[in-house]
Image: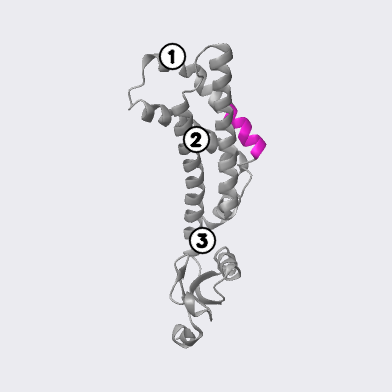
Amino acid sequence: MNRIFKKHTPRWFVFVIDVFICLGSITLAYLLRFNFNIPKVNLTSLHFVFPFVLSVRIMSFLIGRTYAGIVRFTGTKDAERIFVVVAGGSIFFVFSNIIAYYFLTGRFIVPMSIVIIDFITTVFMMIALRFLAKAIYSELINSKKDTVRVIIYGADQFGVITKNTLERDDTIKYTVIGYIDDKKKDLKKKIEGITIYGVEDLEELII
């Protein structure tokens, strides 16, 4: 099982999952917008709306390469990329609506409320699924490793970077039990759930 999870998830698989997320998101957006009772006039337009939305999302994913990241190393940069790419597609929907309403059919292609709901649900589900997969991977891998307790000196950005680097190690399971810092104003505060201690607490921590 570990050998399977240590391999990178195929990019095409991540891409397909993202497309299905978009399909589920636009469906959920319509259901939420109309309280699970979609009017007939809106139902008749879905045969065009769904392919249109999915086509735009697919093109934006290919351009933004949202599927290219390694899921088990998902971080804030990946979340930012997803937000920007999905936002770009939603902005395209808005401009398409404006053009259709004022210059073509006199109607929106996708109701503006649907565009907003779809944007929120798509971003949330794409990011949440990646972090969920990362958490599952980490739990499966770390459960098989011996735990090494670690104390990090310095409760600054470099200390946080050190913590994150240790937690990504696939060979040893590190558990950061605290930060040591000489700034009195920061003592007993927490960074990502880890307490900051003073130098005088070091002996107690290593017992």
Q: Residue at x 54, y 37 (%)?
A: 18
Q: Circles 2 and 3: CB distance less than 8 Å?
A: no
Query: What kind of element bears circle 1?
Result: loop
Q: Which class describes the residues within 10 Å of circle 1: few (<14), some (14-19), or many (20+)? A: few
Query: What kind of element bears circle 3?
Result: helix
- Tell which tag, 2 or 3, sits nearer the viewer: 2
Q: Is residue 129 magenta?
A: no
- Tell which tag, 1 or 2, sits nearer the viewer: 2
Q: Which residues are magenta?
A: 56-64
Q: Closer to the camera, 22 or 95? A: 95
- Looking at the figure, which quarter contains the C terminus? bottom left
**Callout 2, which amino acid?**
Phe
- Please indicate, yes or no, whether residue 105 appears anywhere in the rendered image: yes
Q: Which residue is mark 1?
A: 44
Q: Residue furthest top?
A: 105
Q: Residue at x 51, y 45 (%)?
A: 127
Q: Which residue is mark 3?
A: 141
Q: Closer to the camera, 165 or 183? A: 183
Q: Which class describes the residues within 10 Å of circle 2: few (<14), some (14-19), or many (20+)? A: many
- Residue 119 numbered mark, or none: 2
Among numbered discs 2 and 3, the one appearing first in the sequence: 2
For residue 59, side relative to residue 38 (left or right) = right
x, y percent for residue 151:
52, 77
Q: Residue at x 37, y 30 (%)?
A: 32
